[in-house]
Image: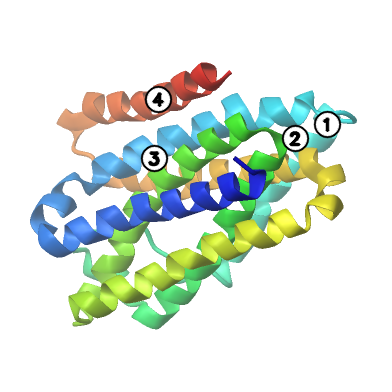
Amino acid sequence: MPLLLKILLASFLSGVVSLLGGIALLGRAEWVRKFSIHFVTFAAGALLAAAFLDLLPEAFALPDASAETLFGYVLGGMLLFFLLERTILKFHAHHHGDDPEHHHASPILVQVADTAHNFIDGIVLAVAFLVDPALGIVTTAAVGAHELPQEIGDFSVMLHHGYRRRTILGVNVLSSLASLLGAFLAYLSRSFIEPYLPVLLALAAGHFIYIAAVDLIPEVSAKTRPDRISHVIGLLLLGVLVVWILGRFLE
């Protein structure tokens, strides 16, 4: 299968997985809200594992990779995404259930932020596939795990504002296409970006670490009852284990 087709297929599949959470919310809102924190916890583990067990080792294995430089770009990736999230993506939100304080953003702004985020995810997927298709598959799994609770949050905001179910689904499908666009443009630019693949992988790792450590884990900590701590730890470790097994299997 041509590399471009693999990249576009992976981007499409990660978008489909993310939409499944939102579609489930439209049909079984109570059930999805009850278990959404489980998806968030699993996604945090998957993102951390993809960053530390796959993206960074691949970055260090590439020619001209310097530990000091790459760790600097990991930090840069975290800081860059912090700035993006507080400016362009400041209305982006993961699932927040029925907490009214998280319903202040208008659906239009949420979708603009979500579209930008999907575009970035598409670039990350393309970069991973350009390095190694196996790394691309692992990255796709991590992105899909993260996008699932994100879409639940986006659907929730639009439902809260009274949008019709058909409109919500259509808007989110269009937003998910931004991932395909980002992946396609990154592939077209491959001759330019290939010399910078170690740097781009380090930035992607910083991106994943930031999402897990700043967005997802604090949300899990805030919403987990003391008697469910072991349950949450198990799901976090499961996310790590699934990505680790997938990576070793593909090797």
Q: Earlier in the sequence, mark 4 or mark 1?
A: 1
For the residues labelled 1 and 3, the Cα–Cα distance comes to 28 Å
Q: Is mark 2 on a helix, strand or loop?
A: helix
Q: What element carries label 3?
A: helix
Instruction: Give neighbour class at mark 1: few <14, some 14-19, many 20+ (Cα, 10 Å).
Output: few
Q: Is mark 4 on a helix, strand or loop?
A: helix
Q: Name the residue under label 3.
A: 43
Residue flagged by tag 2: what amino acid is it? Phe
Disc 2: which residue: 71
User: Position of 204 compared to 118: left or right?
Assistant: right
Residue carrying label 4: 242
Say whether disc 1 or disc 3 marks the residue closer to the N-terminus: 3
Residue at 49% over, 38% down = 47
Instruction: Give the number of the mark in front: 3 or 2.
Output: 3
Is 23 situated left or right of 201 in this image? left
Is 12 on the left-hand or right-hand side of 134? left
Q: Mark 1 points at which residue?
A: 68
